[in-house]
Image (spheres, rainbow, N blue to C red):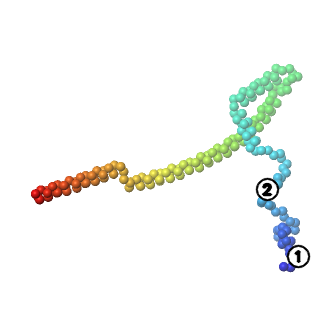
Amino acid sequence: MGSGSEHGPGERGEPKERTLAGASALPRHRVRLDQPRAPRRRLLPQYDPEAFGRFSERFARFLGTGRFIVWMTVIIIVWLLWNVFAPKGLRFDEFPFIFLTLMLSLQASYAAPLILLAQNRQDDRDRVTYEQDRKQGERSIADTEYLTREIAALRMGLGEVATRDWIRSEFQDLMKEMDERRLFPHERRDRSDEGDR
């Protein structure tokens, strides 16, 4: 070990900055994977996509109800009646009803993307449900095939196992055979006894 002047900058436990070959001598910032990234500043306001999606679904659900149609019809009728029969100074949208047309087109221009967003979220949910159903179906098919193989193996095994009827018939045959063996020796003994007399 020599003096401290022989050690390089990274040999004393100090972090050594790497530079690319041919690049400038400026040190490169290393990304730490064990620490979360610091939040970056954004120019646009941030929002919660889930909350916005839930709002769009509620709005689309409301647009698809009869209540919305009734309220929309009532508002348009009141709008038309006010601008036709109200005194001249109180009317705010004269006969061609350009402001009403603008409001309806504004409502439609906001309603269409919100409905599409709600449909996309529903499609995502349907896709997840379909995938879960498909996996459940595959598991059910695999379980059914396994049980079918097990039942077939049990049937093959039961083919070699004695059944109650088979055991009963074997007992009956055995009893007949025992009765035959028992009867014939008695008759032979009786005959031999008669010969002795």
Disc 1 and disc 2 in contact, CB within 8 angstroms: no
154 or 61: nearer the eye? Answer: 154
Q: Which residue does the numbered mark 2 point to in the structure image?
A: 36
Q: Is residue 93 left or right of residue 56?
A: right
Where is residue 178? Give x, y as percent.
Answer: 25, 54
Say if residue 115 shows up in the picture: no
Drawn side of residue 62 relative to residue 82, left or right: left
The residue at the point 67 percent across, 45 percent down is: 124
Residue 31 picture quarter: bottom right
Q: Quadrant of the N terminus?
A: bottom right
Left or right of residue 45: residue 128: left
| Residue 36 image offset from top left, x and y in percent | 79, 56
**Looking at the rendering, in which quadrant would you find the C terminus?**
bottom left
At horizontal 33% and vertical 51% (from top left) the residue drawn is: 167
The x and y percentages for residue 52 are 76, 41
Residue bearing mark 1:
4
* Residue depicted at 54% across the width and 49% down the height: 140
